[in-house]
Amino acid sequence: MASSFKQTLRRWALDAGITSLASRRIKGVRMLMHHGVGEGYDAAALDKQIAWLKARHPIMAFHEVATSLRQGRSLPDFAIVLTFDDGLRNNLTEAYPVLLKHQAPATFFVCPALIDAGQWIWTYEVRERLKSLSQEQLRALATRCSGKACDTLDAFVSWMKKQPNAGRLEALEAVRSATSSFEITETHRREYDLASWDELAALDNRLITIGSHTLSHPILSSLAGGELDNELKGSKQALLAKGLMTEDKAFLCYPDGNHDKRVLACAERHYSAACSTRKGLIASTSPVFAMPRIGANSALEDVAWRLWRPAA
Ligand SMILES: [Zn+2]
């Protein structure tokens, strides 16, 4: 479907109340997955979205749904759960005031080792650095790293995601040295800087739950056993030590949604629940360590549509 026609259709369905009615025909909890709020997705759009959701759905905390699933209790049919991945500072400066205004509970998934190191999530860093290269430079770098020509930034990042962890880190260093003149702007910082420990500690913990997004956001299935355990256990321990997590609300979000059987088993050893990026609604039969979510963006017509069609 052409994108402009798709948006027009979705806007019409939203305005006519059709998506709202249609979603009422399908029971299940909708866990929304947000990332950054800032450039291209301002607080006003989030405010509109939360107000719209709140008028139609109960907004529940992550732990309420996780506990019900764990205990085999029935779930409310149309509840919304809000999650924000990556621990970006703009979640605090832009989204948090909106969440406070609406008293809407949410969970922020953060990466302790990146907060300590003052680094960005590696995918954001690689994308921004690669944007500063010419097409020829990108092709040369990709050929050097991967042995094949990746013509686009997306192809190179996808290639990196498929590498064993050591190979991914090597490629990250190669990207950094190939873009040594890359300059971080104020816009970059507003988009990609992570919240500090002090900023996270200042959040109202009755409204905001802090969850683990691993220590450093690697692709978990690419890790050796010891590394995997360290990423999951280490992240939880760091959050417990900071007083930002409690054992009964130890929640995990898999970077990139990536998890296999081994990752699931490790998550079960250290956490009480986890969410994935698999698109879908949460039913009472959903796996508590791979709860599906729905991608959220600034377009209310898309979010409303996906409450009905989660994968669209
Ligand atoms: Zn992430």
Image (cartoon, helix red, strand yellow):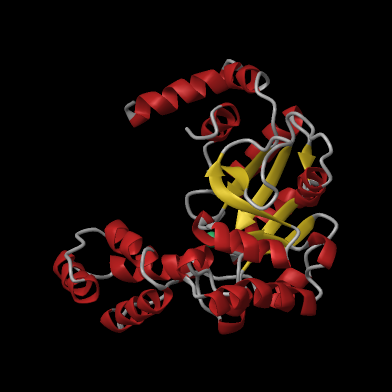
Quadrant in the picture for residue 159 = bottom left
**Residue 210 percent across, percent down from the top left:** 73, 63
Taking 32 as reference, is 198 left or right? right
| Outermost residue, left side | 136
* Residue nearest the viewer, comparing 309 with 266: 266
Q: Is residue 103 left or right of residue 260?
A: right
| Rendered-image quadrant of the N terminus | top left
The vertical placement of 28 against 258, above or below, is above
Residue under the point 64% across and 75% down: 112
**In the image, residue 9 lies at what x, y percent?**
45, 21
* Residue 254 visible in the shown view: no
- Return the x and y of residue 207 as percentages of the image width and height: 81, 54
Residue drawn at point x = 39 percent, y = 64 percent: 161
Image quadrant of ligand 1 equals bottom right
With respect to residue 247, does 172 lie above or below?
below
| Residue 247 image-quadrant placement | bottom right
